[in-house]
Amino acid sequence: MKKPVKVTVTGAAGQISYSLLFRIAAGEMLGKDQPVDLQLLEIPPAMGALSGVVMELEDCAFHTLNSIVATDDPETAFGDTDFVLMVGARPRGPGMERKDLLEANARIFTAQGTVLDKVASADVRVLVVGNPANTNALITASKLKRLSATQVTAMTRLDHNRAISQVAAQTGQPASAIKKIIIWGNHSATQYPDIHHATVNSQPVLEVVERQWFESDFIPTVQKRGAQVIAARGLSSAASAGSSAMDHVRTWMQGTEDGNWTSMAICSDGSYGVSEGLFYSFPVVCKSGHYEIVQNLDINDFSRKKMNITEQELTEERDTIKDLL
Amino acid sequence: MKKPVKVTVTGAAGQISYSLLFRIAAGEMLGKDQPVDLQLLEIPPAMGALSGVVMELEDCAFHTLNSIVATDDPETAFGDTDFVLMVGARPRGPGMERKDLLEANARIFTAQGTVLDKVASADVRVLVVGNPANTNALITASKLKRLSATQVTAMTRLDHNRAISQVAAQTGQPASAIKKIIIWGNHSATQYPDIHHATVNSQPVLEVVERQWFESDFIPTVQKRGAQVIAARGLSSAASAGSSAMDHVRTWMQGTEDGNWTSMAICSDGSYGVSEGLFYSFPVVCKSGHYEIVQNLDINDFSRKKMNITEQELTEERDTIKDLL
């Protein structure tokens, strides 16, 4: 067994965390030889429920779970941490405008980003899952002085996985046969799931599926999948979000497979003309805990328009909360 | 990748299944090289919710998930199946007596056992998770003609894991240091968690902890842990139950580690004087899909009394539903 690493999860008593924590503790995110110290953050009213989650984690007798701290104090939760999964966010309440939602979350992530910068490990890696994830990541990153904005990412892996699954179903091939899907932009209904570069068993997907299906069926299905799950389950996606969060961190650390990439929302460096500093989802290649944007992909007019629409939404989100940056 | 195996889960839209299905689909129960066909059973009113779970399973793009069938027809769900996790059961409703609960479940498991015997793979392995698990397993097994009662087991692995976790906490050692815990009897508050043979880093646990702690603290804590989790979470154990169900099947197939055993409720062959045919939890050693009761352990008077109490409860449960056997 290696030396334990510290993993912080915020919103730890919520539904996504309930799907996530047991798999992290079982070594399924960082490896069966990598013990973890869980540092769980919740707001005071949820500490009772969190104590029940802690009991259940203990009850599993996981060999890779070294210790658990449950706290409502961010300094404790983020102290010396190596990995942070920011799952907790303010959901939209009745009568709440999008602006109110962005601002409520901006306040949460301002506070957490500030503490993170103060107490986390210098090498910390952060994944923002709580929505609006891209802009929550932007706010978090804007508070970093000691740490770098490149250490903060937001999750579009669920969208990426959904896109793979839709292409797999349409082509009648297993998910493992589908490579080089891209999610561009915001984790929202403006996201652009792009299959222009995707392959199925090494053949371009657009040679196998109809373009009509791509434009009129695939894109809106992936964009609106979250709402479809809510309609069926009566609850928002939790286990699939948790699973994708683990995929995101695992790929970040263990690397993308040869000849493939994944999608991560990261601080734009201006690649593909995306405004610098926005948290925008790009195709990335990962290796040993580092990611790099896949460069020089051909972008046609259709794609450029879709990429601009989702960039525009992210710009507006940033403008809405600019006083807090 | 190996040839896919079929895994049936009943009560597939419930909370335990929601914690279980994604891990099974990710290859965490049967191995990362073992694709699975999931055959999910629910009652008609839950089929809508189940469709949402299926969408989320698809959305994860798991490489080890070969196919999913969601159905309210037991013949379809149990058809040619290799593994059955019987998670669905009737929970106790308001004003329901224990007798009513036993009988309501007896009817469910009578029907399912009958179909199972008719359509499952000849080599099927069954784990009953739904409570009252031991007696539900007894009923299921009583309906088997083509299949053998030894193919049916009930889950006490959650109790076993809870017992390990309590000893680990008390001795300040990791869970991996604790071996040879035993859960005897019923998965209920009469169960007897026994540490007379248990070791911590190869030293007898009873040389490390106080006997007083064992008798007055440890035993009731493990027996009543489920109620304690409900009190804290406001919901019954789901993720820990799901995790332990996976442990049960994984250990059954991959084997217990050398110098250790696990606990499984199985059809008694009269070992340790337990009435033949009762589903009673014993210490077992597993190897390549087979289990064997650990024999010739010394049982002192203290243990004998506790083992008899839980056997007595199982006998009464059997008597309550004897007209359905």
Image (cartoon, coloured by chain):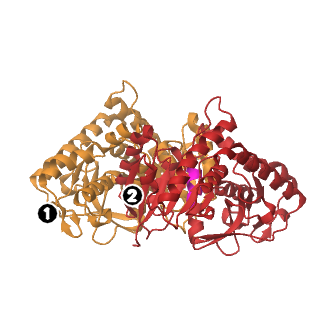
Chain colours: A orange, B red
Q: Could you say where residue B28 lies in the image, as x and y percent from the top left?
A: 49, 63
Q: Mark 2 points at which residue?
A: A248
Quick one: which residue is furthest to the top in this view?
Answer: A95
Residue at point 50% right, 53% down? Answer: B115
Q: Is the magenta stretch mostly helix, strand or loop?
A: helix
- The kind of residue tagged 2 is His
Residue at point 29% right, 61% down? Answer: A284
- The kind of residue tagged 1 is Glu
Quick one: which residue is furthest to the left in this view?
Answer: A301
State whether residue B145 appears in this view: yes
Q: Which chain carries label 2?
A: A
Q: Mark 1 points at which residue?
A: A207
Q: How many marks?
A: 2
State whether residue A123 appears in this view: no
Q: Which of A114 and B9 is in front in this view?
A: B9
Do the residues at discs 1 and 2 belong to one chain? yes
Could you tell whether A42 is left or right of A175 in the image?
right
Name which quarter of the figure residue B150 lies in: bottom right
Residue at point 14% right, 57% down? Answer: A299
Q: Which chain carries label 1?
A: A
Circle 2: is it few (<14), some (14-19), or many (20+) Cα within 10 Å?
A: many
Q: Which of marks 1 and 2 is in front?
A: 1
- For marks 1 and 2 on the same chain, the one whose residue lies earlier in the sequence: 1
Tag shown at residue A117:
none
Q: Which of A127 and A218 is in front in this view?
A: A218
Q: Could you say where residue B260 lies in the image, as x and y percent from the top left?
A: 70, 70
Q: Give the range drawn in magenta.
A: B239-246
User: In the image, is residue B65 above or below residue A184?
Assistant: below
Residue at point 33% right, 70% down? Answer: A257
SS assignment at label 2: helix
Could you tell whether A118 is left or right of A97 in the image?
right
